[in-house]
Image: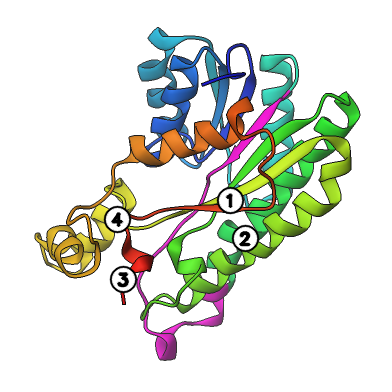
Amino acid sequence: MRGLRGKRVLVSGGSRGIGEATARRFLEEGARVHIGGLDPVDVSAAVTRLRPLGEVSGTPVDVSSEPDVRRLVQDAREALGGIDTLINNAGTAWREPFLEITPDHWDRMLAVNLRGMFLVAQAVSRILVQQRTGGAIVNMSSTNGVGGEADYAHYNASKAGVLLLTKTMAVELGPHGIRVNALCPGYIETPLNAQIAGNLGNSDFAADYARLKVPLNRTGQPDEVAAAYAFLASDDASFITGSEIVVDGGQLASM
């Protein structure tokens, strides 16, 4: 894609699943990448796997922690010599009926998925404004931010919040030449979704879900979300801001 070669890219939640696939895609496009991830072992392993593709480094981080986020963004800035693109990908999810959600569980979900999104985006945006070179930010939302799904009230609320955060950022940062968009993936085959399915005790959950709810009759792959991230960060999307792209195999199109 146009305009990605040489770009300095920070990928939060970049140590596995969609995040690692996205880091790989940007390296293949000739970008330089710094990843963040919650588990130091996962971060180190991902950097080792990705290093043959190009310049990559990483920082362990809990995105809900302001000191951690400051360290992540500073490490990325130092490693890359600045930041051009933020792939704001870190997040968490688990199933829990609405009537059983505890305040602590509610707070943790929003702390990672919404507070963390805000903290990383704000820290990077301040750098982009200082650099005066524009930039691109892509936030991770979900189809669950567009329509409600049972047993995910806290997750749904956090991802809906990301969409309005994205639009407001786009309005305020547009005059600085900074584009801000969001992705809304549907069911993607990731370690997190595999863990959720495993907790249900149904080894066929992904296939059943796709058969019942996805017109393409399959679940998505991390590389397919990574491609959408790359597009929104590229010059091919130079007049797209304040928008969301749905990557769901047609799930939201079906009644």
Whole-percent x, y for residue 34 in the image: 58, 24
Q: Residues within 10 Å of mark 1 (few under 14, many from 20)?
A: many
Looking at the rendered image, the disc whose residue lies closer to the viewer, 1 or 3, is: 3
* Residue 134 located within the stretch drawn in magenta: no
Q: Earlier in the sequence, mark 3 or mark 4?
A: 4
Amino acid type at circle 4 is Asn
Front residue of 167 and 86: 167
The answer to the question of whether label 2 and label 1 lie on touching residues, with beta carbons closer than 8 A, is: yes
Q: Which residues are magenta?
A: 83-106
Q: Residue at x 47, y 27 (%)?
A: 23
Q: Which mark is residue 254?
A: 3
* Residue 100 located within the stretch drawn in magenta: yes
For disc 4, the marked residue is 193
For disc 2, the marked residue is 162
Whole-percent x, y for residue 254 in the image: 31, 71
Q: Residue at x 30, y 54 (%)?
A: 249
Alpha-carbon span between mark 4 and mark 1: 20 Å
Q: Quadrant of residue 240?
A: top right
For disc 1, the marked residue is 182
Q: Earlier in the sequence, mark 2 or mark 1?
A: 2
Amino acid type at circle 2 is Val
Q: Residues within 10 Å of mark 2 (few under 14, many from 20)?
A: many
Alpha-carbon span between mark 1 and mark 3: 21 Å
Q: Earlier in the sequence, mark 3 or mark 2?
A: 2
Q: Quadrant of residue 28?
A: top left
Amino acid type at circle 1 is Ala
For numbered disc 1, what is the local secondary structure?
Answer: strand
Q: Left of 144 or right of it: where is 128?
A: right
Looking at the rendered image, the disc whose residue lies closer to the viewer, 2 or 1, is: 1
Q: Earlier in the sequence, mark 4 or mark 1?
A: 1
